[in-house]
Amino acid sequence: MGLTPLLSLYLTAEYPGKGTVLNGVSLDVQAGEILGLVGQSGSGKSTLALSILRLLHFKGGSDSGSILFRETDLMKASEKDMRKLRGKDISLVMQSPLASLNPSMTVGNQLLEAWRAHSKLDGTQVIMETLRQVSLSVDVAFLNRYPTQLSVGLAQRVLIAMAVLHKPALLLADEPTSALDALTQAEILELFARLNRENATAMLYVSHDLLSVASLCHRIAILHEGRIVEQGEPKDIFENPQHEYTRKLVNAVPTLRFKSRELIPA
């Protein structure tokens, strides 16, 4: 008998005038696992993340099905119960950190507010440790800066620090590197891998970039036309894709080989 998944869902979601976006999507995430969800823009990846947090109605959408988190169906949870879960047991990292952070509050105050949302204890030590874990400065000058004074990469690290302050069991990462340059993207991917190792944080990593997902995730699920068309380990997805859409994704990934000093497409 296999282990009971940390998250197990079966979802259908739609928007008025747009029809069904997710059509019976079935996914499991094990404790400590990083599952990559790959699909093209508009395929419903962000809709899935919002549904898990029970926030889809704020975007005008509706959903049905089941979302079992630690064997409790979040579809039946009250808003009061969801507020206790969001940011503590399940956290979200969005793709636009400068838009997600409050421009009128300092970095330090936003971290403190994120801590106080779920704890009455002094969070100073936890905040300092979390900042170090995500390779951010712990000096007063940095904590007194505003988001508009940060680079996109630094702002993303602040957003990740806020998301993992309470060491959530599940982190939802929605296109978290799409606004970053290649070097910063690689650093953020390594940061997610380290948080997974050190905190045993399970992740649902949402992206349209198959290559970055393959470098980070234990398994990959392919979302196409509102359904999961294929799931497997990165090696299986790349070496033996079963679905036609997966084959197209794999074939679109550039592979290069070196010959002498020339870079030649394979």
Image: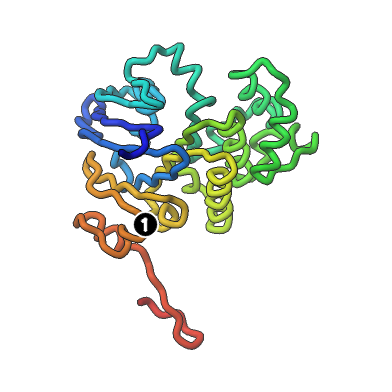
Q: Position of residue 232 (x, y in %)?
A: 31, 52
Q: Which residue is drawn at 38% across and 38% down?
A: 29
Query: Toward the viewer: 248 or 145?
Result: 248
Q: In which quarter of the image is the N terminus?
A: top left
Q: Quadrant of the C terminus?
A: bottom left
Q: In this view, does 157 lie to the left or right of 211?
A: right
Specify the farthest residue to the front.
1
Q: In this view, does 62 lie to the left or right of 101?
A: left
Specify the farthest residue to the bottom.
260
How many marks can you see?
1
Task: Classify mark 1: helix, strand or loop.
Answer: helix
Q: Where is residue 219 in the image (x, y as percent from the top left)?
A: 37, 49
Crowding near the residue tagged with mark 1, few <14, some 14–19, many ≥20 C-alpha atoms within 10 Å: many
Q: Residue at x 44, y 55 (%)?
A: 212
Would residue 15 be visible to someone looking at this image?
Answer: yes
Q: Which residue is drawn at 41% across and 80% down?
A: 264
Would residue 47 be visible to someone looking at this image?
Answer: no
Image quadrant in which you'd find residue 59: top left
Query: Toward the viewer: 54 or 238?
Result: 238
Residue under label 1? 234
Query: Toward the viewer: 260 or 74?
Result: 74
Query: Toward the viewer: 242 or 265?
Result: 242
What color scheme is it? rainbow
Q: Position of residue 158 (x, y in %)?
A: 62, 37
Image quadrant in which you'd find residue 3: top left
Q: What amino acid does circle 1 point to?
A: Pro
Q: Position of residue 183 (x, y in %)?
A: 57, 58
* Residue 17 in the image: above or below residue 201: above
